[in-house]
Amino acid sequence: MDYKKIFKSRKLRAFILGLLRFVPDKTMLKMQYKIKTGRQLNLKDPKRYTEKLQWYKLNYKNPIMHRCVDKYQVREFIKEKGLEEILVKLYAKSDSVKGLDFERLPDQFVIKTTNGGGGLNVIVCPDKTKLDRRELEEKLACKKIKSRTGGREWAYYGLEPGVIVEELLINSKNPLAGVNDYKIFCYQGKAKYIVVDVDRYVGHKRNFYDRDWNRLEYSSDCPPADCDIEKPENYEKMLQIAEKLSEDFPYVRVDLYNVEGKIYFGELTFYPWSGYVQFEPDEADFVFGKDFELKSFK
């Protein structure tokens, strides 16, 4: 069931989820998993990647995760790992959009809330003169996440609100397309699979690869690219960075950008797609779940 077609308004969906905040996490996750995948959620002996992500939400509660999902605090985490050089340039930090001095910002930038939003609370501004600040304030309204998010993602609970403004990374070959996004699946500090998102602003496409850059004939909610995506020249360095950033956790997806040979940090994601993504073929769900070891941290 595609519930977004039934409830098209994001605000309405958020309102409904807010009304259901009293529902216990385990019950809510079972309900959502059934609605979004059409399957019963197996939490006793999960095999699928999507099932293990739901188990992860309920059972793995490492306080470091709060820092890592906060878009501002994670910068200190990156520095502590000795990887400050991969941070995107920071222009400003404020408690809200109203607190920003737009006159001091460059003509192009990216502005986002610090406490997440599933990619919806990120605004790319290629031309500051065309920016509607009132609309921006509405989209990036800063609210504290007290508890029980829509997807019941524990790592985001209690995060303080805020906004940051960062450098806009440009694809010089095709500025309108955006830069390639390399999403690296890391299990217990070992990089295993890479999801590459391309042309994010002009026909979003996605390819899947194993660690050796062999293409996997999988797809998800985005169509695959028409051709193979070239492996970055400094690919091994990207893997090293991903493994350094993931070494403290049983599982995390490390998102990196690679712009003309320069590696930049994107984000750390503990619950990719909130664990409700549909893979094609279905076997991919089991493949990605195989290395997601739960016994080691029960």
Image (cartoon, rainbow, N blue to C red):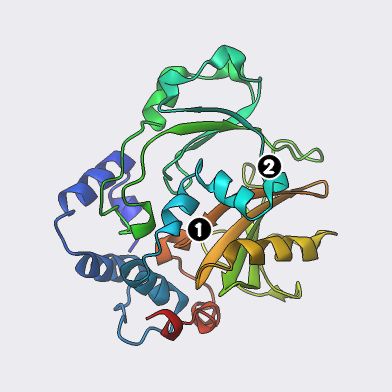
* Vertical position of residue 244 compared to residue 47: above or below: above
* Residue under pointer 2: 178
Rendered image quadrant of residue 224: bottom right
Q: Residues within 10 Å of mark 2 (few under 14, many from 20)?
A: many
Query: What element does badge 2 sit on?
Result: loop
* Vertical position of residue 148 compared to residue 61: above or below: above
Q: Is residue 210 visible?
A: yes
Q: Is residue 4 left or right of residue 242?
A: left
Residue situated in front as seen by the camera: 175 or 111: 111
Residue situated in front as seen by the camera: 74 or 38: 74
* Residue under pointer 1: 269
Q: Residue at x 79, y 66 (%)?
A: 236
- Relative image position of residue 4 (x, y in whole percent): 34, 52
Q: Quadrant of the C terminus?
A: bottom left
Query: What element does badge 1 sit on?
Result: strand
Q: Quadrant of the N terminus?
A: bottom left
Kind of residue sitting beneath label 2: Gly
Q: Residue at x 67, y 75 (%)?
A: 216
